[in-house]
Amino acid sequence: MENKRPFVNCAKTKMWKMTNEETGTYSSTVTLDFEKRMTKYTDSVQTNSTPLYGDGELVEVAVSEGQGALSIGVHHVTDGERVDLYGESNVDGVTVNTGDGVPPYFCVANMAKKRNGMVNLRKWFKVSFAPHEETVTQIEDNGIQYSMPTLNGTYSKNIPLGMKSARVEVDPSIPEGAAMIEKWFSIADYIGGNSFVNTSTFKNGTADIVDGAEITEGTTLTLTGAATGGTSPYKYDFLYKADSSNYWECIAEDTSTASQSLTLPTVDADTPYTIRIVARDSSGLTREKSVGIVVKDST
């Protein structure tokens, strides 16, 4: 559990709508901006345990991934904002459904002021706000009582970006701190410092492997881990699996050796495979990059 009490001193809350769930990318400009309205938030984290076989071996397909509940209180939510959040609005007490019934994902950026003048920055990369009758609470600010609807959502892992990010004790009075705050709210994937990007490559000989490439069994491929931004040094996991399987085969794990070889397995018939390189920086951030191929039966 995090943030056992609501934080009511939030100066900014901004959101970007996800435009491509497969690649985890967002609109280039802010979709919703609650900076002009007093906000609060609570963040409750839940972590699933990793199942084991009876002999104690990990079930690889069920590696634990965290999830959590995020509640954001904002002073006044417009019908247009409800359309963006839920795909529906309420006009004169009548619900108007303007979407396909599937709430979109958002990246949510937040800044909370501290009494010492510093600020804490937080960003959740994949949040879905479920349609509901918003809970109204009363909070006090300088003796004024505010009625505050609460937007209730859940967040999960966004593959390219992870769960969430935080920068604490940022000083807005110095140029470095002011620049970090500006960038924090300028793009959805900014996490402080340089953005961490997986630039790994998959090659068959000297040629880059493209999604859907057909490659004969027994061919040896070259996988090269690479990354930019984040906090160096980097380490890499190299994995592959048949798309029909639930289990990843590990070529190398948690290694600083960036170049690895993969000899494609023998297959009974043409078989789709996925090859993946996971880059990890020294602060624990991860970025995944995958390519899908078809391993061709040579007979």
Image: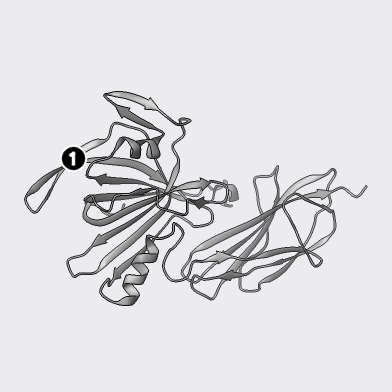
Q: How many marks?
A: 1
Left or right: residue 197 compared with residue 215: left
Identify the residue at the far top of this view. Answer: 94
- Coloring basis for residues: one colour
Relative depth, front residue between 40 and 80: 80
Q: In which quadrant of the rendered view does residue 225 lie?
A: bottom right
Instruction: State the residue position of label 1.
Output: 137
Q: In which quadrant of the rendered view does residue 145 lie?
A: top left
Left or right: residue 210 compared with residue 246: right
Secondary structure type for disc 1: strand
Identify the residue at image location x=8%, y=48%.
144
Left or right: residue 230 compared with residue 69: right
Label 1 is placed on what type of residue?
Thr
Identify the residue at the far right of this view. Answer: 299
Residue 262 lies, in percent from the top left, at 76, 62
Relative depth, front residue between 167 and 38: 38
Identify the residue at image location x=93%, y=47%.
299
Few, some or many C-alpha atoms within 10 Å of disc 1 (few <14, some 14-19, many ≥20)? few
Residue 85 lies, in percent from the top left, at 38, 39
Residue 24 lies, in percent from the top left, at 53, 51
Identify the residue at image location x=29%, y=31%.
133
Residue 157 lies, in percent from the top left, at 48, 51
Height in image: 153 above or below 180? above
